[in-house]
Amino acid sequence: MAKAALITTQQAEQQLQTECFVVYCEECGLKVKLPPLNPRQKALCPRCGYLLTVFHPNAFERVLAFSITALILLVLSLSFDFVALQFQGQVRTISLLDSYFILADQGYMAIGLLLLLTVVLLPFIVILALLYLLFSLRNQRYPFKGEFISQWVLALLPWSMAEIFLIGVLVSLIKISTMATVVLGSSFYAYILFSLSFIAAIQYIDKQHIQRVLSQLNPQLNNINKQNIKQQAALSIQKTWALLFTAILLYFPANMLPIMTTRSLGKEELNTILGGVIVLWQSGSYPIAIVIFIASIVVPILKFIVLAWLNYSVQNQSDNFQLQRTQLYRFTEFIGRWSMIDVFAVAILASLIQLGTTMTIYPGKAALAFTAVVILTMLAANTFDSTLIWKKNERSK
């Protein structure tokens, strides 16, 4: 590669302050010429208000620092006890990885695998990919498959749910704290610090900055990037409808069947999602009841309504309320993953409360159905092409 193409990350930051460059808005497809930016200055799409880029001084160094810290803390969180339960003289201790094996033994390998992926493996992969990319860029080398890796890192971020898992854990611990003693292990605190470091690293990731440096290190990407605007897939609308209808069908068993089964002293108690909310409310745990009600009942219904309206409107080439529809899509895409709180809470309860005939908790059939609802609605939001809101005639070309 020619030496003229090589730049340092400091030079790339200087270009942000001195040069104009052209980008395409991911949400509406508008071609935007960005002016030079000052430190911590944001650039928004003039048409839909989408955040195009933010100039963070020393962004790569900050991402590297937080990513290395997060990696160390993630390893530590897997090395010790996560949480312990003391109940009627019995002590039950689990590590973070134990949840997967316990759920697999109970016949819920899909939920255990999802827990393992979203809480450990995907964050781990994202961190390693970031370290590989940024160390290469800092050393003025174009990383092998750099464009491909950068796209996958950004695509995996919504599926890395460390912060949502922590809230789910807190919900589960609050549920059982009234009947047993909960002891938080070293790994629990390490995972909290990991989550904070991981979130901090993500805050300094700027897609436009990374792609601009990659393009300058490999000029052949310039032509590719010009064509990498969100394309109008011929089956985009049909895919969204298929995923959305499947999620709606699964939503009924997810709410009608028990999401959790509790066996205690020979008695069996079945809890649906709404039933669990009612029990929490009656026991005085009002904040937790509200969180579960919003995340598990309100959010999925809102996603169904909003995504159905958005998909119907672009299918009929409507040009009404374009900005409002784009904002609704943005909000829907953001809140969809938070419905996993209840799934994580059930997974932790089922992993921790395994006390034989005294008390044992198992996931119910609704747990699988509700997990599928969350995944399908997230995929439906991803397959929906928001640029169709602004390009009503492009599909017919």
Image: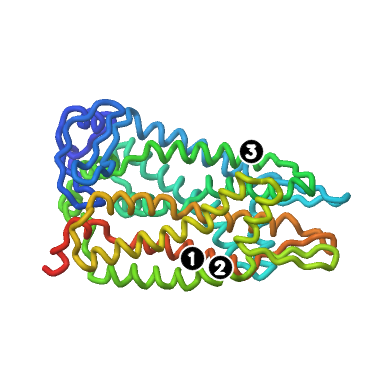
Residue 188 visible in the displayed image: yes
Looking at the image, the residue that sits furthest to the front is 282
Residue type of the residue flagged with mark 2:
Ala
Rate crowding at label 3 as few (under 14), some (14 to 19) or many (20 or more) other CA atoms within 10 Å: some
The residue closer to the viewer here, 187 or 396, is: 396
Looking at the image, the residue that sits furthest to the top is 38
Q: Mark 2 points at which residue?
A: 254
Residue type of the residue flagged with mark 1:
Val
Q: Nearer the viewer, mark 1 or mark 2?
A: 2
The residue closer to the viewer here, 349 or 328, is: 328
Determine whether 295 is above or below 239 in the image: above
Q: Position of residue 200 (x, y in %)?
A: 45, 36
Q: Earlier in the sequence, mark 1 or mark 2?
A: 2
The N terminus lies in quadrant: top left
Q: Which of marks 3 and 2 is in front?
A: 2
Asked if the residue at tag 2 contacts the one at tag 1, i.e. Cβ–Cβ closer than 8 Å, the answer is yes
Asked which secondary structure carries label 3, the reply is helix
The residue closer to the viewer here, 83 or 264, is: 264
Asked which secondary structure carries label 1, the reply is helix
Asked if the residue at tag 2 contacts the one at tag 3, i.e. Cβ–Cβ closer than 8 Å, the answer is no
Q: Mark 1 points at which residue?
A: 373
The C terminus lies in quadrant: bottom left
Real-space Cα separation, disc 1 to disc 2, in angstroms: 8 Å
